[in-house]
Amino acid sequence: MGGNFSCVRSKESPTGGALSVPRDSPFGKLKRSLSSRSSARARALVAPSDRSLVDLCLGIICDRIHEFAPTALAALPPDLAQLVLNTLIGTGVLDEEIAARLAGLSHYQLRLAGYPGPVTDGWLVSLTNSALETLVLDHSLVTDVGLLRLGHLPALRVLSLQHCQHLSSGFACVLARLPALEELRLSGIPTLRDESVQWLRACPALRALSISLCREVTTLEPLRGLTRLESLDLGWCGGVDDAALGALRGLTSLRRLVLDLARCPGVGDAAVRAVCAAAPPGLVRLDLAYTRVTDAGLTGVARALGTLRVLSLEACAVGDAGVRALRALRDLECLDLSDTAVGNAGVAEGVAALARLHTLSLAFTAVEDEGVEALGALRALRRLNLDCRGVGDAACRALARLAALEELDLFGARVTDAGCGALSALRALTSLEVCGGAVGGAGVAALARLPALRRLSLAQNARVSSRAIPYLLRLSTLAELNLSQTAVASGIEELGRLPRLERLILHGTRVRVSNARRVQEQLPGLLVVGIPGIDVPK
């Protein structure tokens, strides 16, 4: 199954990919924009002649930060103060001594998630002020003591303490001092318990709440008063069960709700009925992956939750009957049915009716060529995962009619050279996996006709040899290529002629280190994976 394909986000990174096990795969990986750190570092490395006046001023201030009196820094206007702080954070030079010098700085955001140095309580006193609107301390060493020293922050709207391992269950009392709080992220705090959740009553303005990966939480009763809540992430909260979900009925003013219940083993059909009973008029996303939901629990979904756009039922005990009940969800755009009992009938009588679908996963299902034929009606489909052993060349001929398709995962499908010939009609395709073991040189030649392809995996096709390299050279847009467990050996250095190649995966091949290095010599930024002894690009 393609590494990160999913309708929903990963719990390994609660704000950002999928629940499936990651592996070296080009399928479904979404490029993130540069972080503030990388952006600042890139700005610092720009040649002086190419830097703006603002960049030059920031560089001078940060280089000479120890020479400025705290009173002078405190006099900076808020926008400039924020730029100075962002640059110090982005270049990694901020430490406790500099933080103390910045006391009185009139910035309005403090984002220290993943900062390379230890972020401790001492930083908070120096770097917070009454005008602060955003405070992000994910993975830091802050404790209850540090948070309590913050005092009253009347303007704070965003607080993120994800994976802060040094907080006790009592830290949540700080919420009473944050009257304007709208977004609260507490994922992965092991000490978050029911007594901590009680403090949510002090946050009536809350619009987004994440307490995922907090396995000690069993009650959601305090949420009844959060009538402005729009996004709720309870994923991997093992203590939450059907009864706890009854609290959703108190959220009477919801306009838009994102509800993540992934990997909550106590959640089943009764929870779905509770969500339907609450009937939030704008429920757009519901994640039930790895829960005990069955076909019976889905019968009322279409009637009560007609505004759903994203639905994940990955690894649920649902089959064709349950999927038939979903056909009335006319607004559905993203559906994950991977690792379920859905077969051809469910696709033909349920999924095929969802005309707005742009993202669909049927990986590890019972779907075969016949079922794929029915997908021809989904002309809006852009991302499709069909990692199914029952899918073969006939399915490829049906898929060739989906002109909008951009990402296609046929990892374990029985696709041969003939199937690749059919897939060559997908001119918009940017990402493709065909790793079933039956593709050879003729198939690669056919795929070389795909003009927009950026990621290609031919892994596990032993018939793909070095003779296929000339065909691969026609893919001038290729950025990522996986040739693991193929017969490719000599001639690999020719791939250095692919101008945009960034990642080359060669696990289980006979490629020599010397040949792989020749590719890197032509493409200095190329990352070669799977060859012991190969250098990692700087």
Image (cartoon, rainbow, N blue to C red):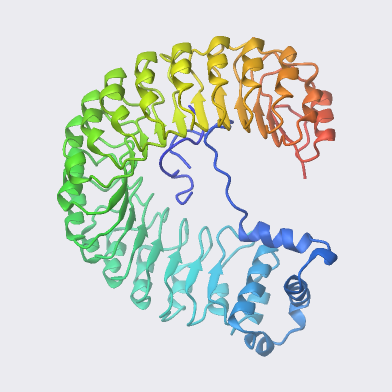
Q: Where's residue 122, x and y in %?
A: 57, 74
Q: In this view, does 276 lie to the left or right of 417?
A: left
Q: Where's residue 361, x and y in %?
A: 40, 30
Any part of residue 326 in sight: no
- Considering depth in this image, is 240 or 285 the residue closer to the camera? 285
- For the point 35% across and 47% down, the residue is 235
> Which quadrant of the figure has residue 70?
bottom right
Q: From what the image shows, is residue 510 above or below residue 361?
A: above
Q: In this view, does 339 lie to the left or right of 28?
A: left
- For the point 73% across and 58% down, the residue is 42
Q: Where's residue 34, x and y in %?
A: 62, 54
Q: In this view, does 52 lie to the left or right of 412?
A: right
- For the point 28% across and 71% down, the residue is 204
> Which quadrant of the figure has residue 280?
bottom left
Q: Where's residue 370, x and y in %?
A: 35, 14
Q: From what the image shows, is residue 411 above or below residue 298?
A: above
- Considering depth in this image, is 196 or 14 the residue closer to the camera? 14
- For the point 43% across and 74% down, the residue is 156
Q: From what the image shows, is residue 97 above or below residue 289?
A: below
Any part of residue 55 in sight: yes
Q: From what the image shows, is residue 228 above or below residue 319?
A: below
- Considering depth in this image, is 350 or 211 the residue closer to the camera? 350
Which quarter of the figure is the C terminus placed in? top right
